[in-house]
Structures are given as C-alpha cells and as structure tokens.
Image (cartoon, rainbow, N blue to C red):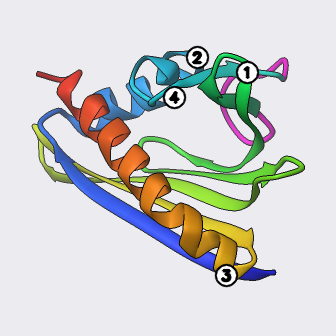
C-alpha cells in the first residue's frame, strides 16, 4: 500500500463563513456531490468525533465511505480520517478568505491504496470531485 494524494482548489464568490456553514451541513453534501448520499452516524453533528458515511454509486452498486472528523477549526479547516473497508486515508477541507466576498476552497485527499490501483481510479476520481466542487460553487450564485 502507498500514500497517493489528490488536491483541487477553486474560488467561490461567497463569504468564508457562508461557505463553511454550507460545507458543515453533511447531509446536504449529497445535493452537490455526484451520485452520493451523505449522512451523520454519530450523535454529534459537528466537531471532532463526528462520524459520517457517504455512499457513492448508482442503486445498490457503489462504495460506502465511512469517516470521522479529526480536526475542526471553523471557518477554515476540517480534517477527516476514512475508516471504511475499501476507502482508507485522510481528507481535508480548507477555506481561505481572499476578500470579504471571495473564498478559496482547497480540497485534498490522501488515499491509501496500491499505486497501480490509484492510477487506474485517479482520472474518474479527479473528474468526479472536480464536477462536484463546481456544483458546490454554483450553489452560491
């Protein structure tokens, strides 16, 4: 197994707190993430220790991604650790304020997988996340 990184940044025309508040609504992420349903599996819904599950797929065919929040620094950074049987690694949302109405959203993942498998899934993963983040940015127009 090896560590494989993927990162995407985009500019969102909205205040940083507004972007953070939208990201922190876990169940609503399914509104902009391609073919994904997200739900909280812990009693707490925000902060360190929050557990989240996300199923990405069509019908019963897909992948379940379970994760737990390991760092929570509103309105800037949320780190998660992926705890599922298939998806392992870490993820990060990081927001940077450019001006009062503009935020940079940095999304990154460290995927623990054999490098050959990662290279096979990378194009689809990158494209899916890129499209999803563009959909997220459009929610602020």
Q: Answer with left or right where residue 50 lies relative to residue 47.
A: right
Label 3, label 2: how many angstroms apart (C-alpha)?
A: 31 Å
Residue to which mark 2 is pinned: 27
Q: Tell me if residue 114 comes above or below residue 24 in the rendering.
A: below
> Which of the 4 quarters of the picture holds residue 3?
bottom right
Give the mark nearest the N terminus, 3 or 2: 2
Locate the C terminus and report the quarter of the image it occupies. Answer: top left
- Magenta span includes 56: no
For label 4, the SS is: loop
* Marks 2 and 1, how far apart at CA: 7 Å
Residue tagged 3: 115
Q: Residues within 10 Å of mark 2 (few under 14, many from 20)?
A: some
Q: Earlier in the sequence, mark 2 or mark 1?
A: 2
Q: Secondary structure at mark 2?
A: helix
Disc 4 from disc 3: Cα separation? 31 Å
Q: Position of residue 111 (x, y in %)?
A: 66, 67
User: 13 or 113, which lies in front?
Assistant: 113
Q: Which residue is mark 1?
A: 40
Q: Quadrant of residue 62?
A: top right
Disc 3 crowd rating (10 Å Cα; few below 14, some 14-19, many 20+) is: some
**Badge 2 vs badge 1, beta-carbon distance below 8 Å:** yes
Tag 1 and tag 3, C-beta contact below 8 Å: no
Residue 40 is situated, as x and y percent measured from the top left of the image, at 73, 21
Region rendered in magenta:
42-50
């Amino acid at each position: 197994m090896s560590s494989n990184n993927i990162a995407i940044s985009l500019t969102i025309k909205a205040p940083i707190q507004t972007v953070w508040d939208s990201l922190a609504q876990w169940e609503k992420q399914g509104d902009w993430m391609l073919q994904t349903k997200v739900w909280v599996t812990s009693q707490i819904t925000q902060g360190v220790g929050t557990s989240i599950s996300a199923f990405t797929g069509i019908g019963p065919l897909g992948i379940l991604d379970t994760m737990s929040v390991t760092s929570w620094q509103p309105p800037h950074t949320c780190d998660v650790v992926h705890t599922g049987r298939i998806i392992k690694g870490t993820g990060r949302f990081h927001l940077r304020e450019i001006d009062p109405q503009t935020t940079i959203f940095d999304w990154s993942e460290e995927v623990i997988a054999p490098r050959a498998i990662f290279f096979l899934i990378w194009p689809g993963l990158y494209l899916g996340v890129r499209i999803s983040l563009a959909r997220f940015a459009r929610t602020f127009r």
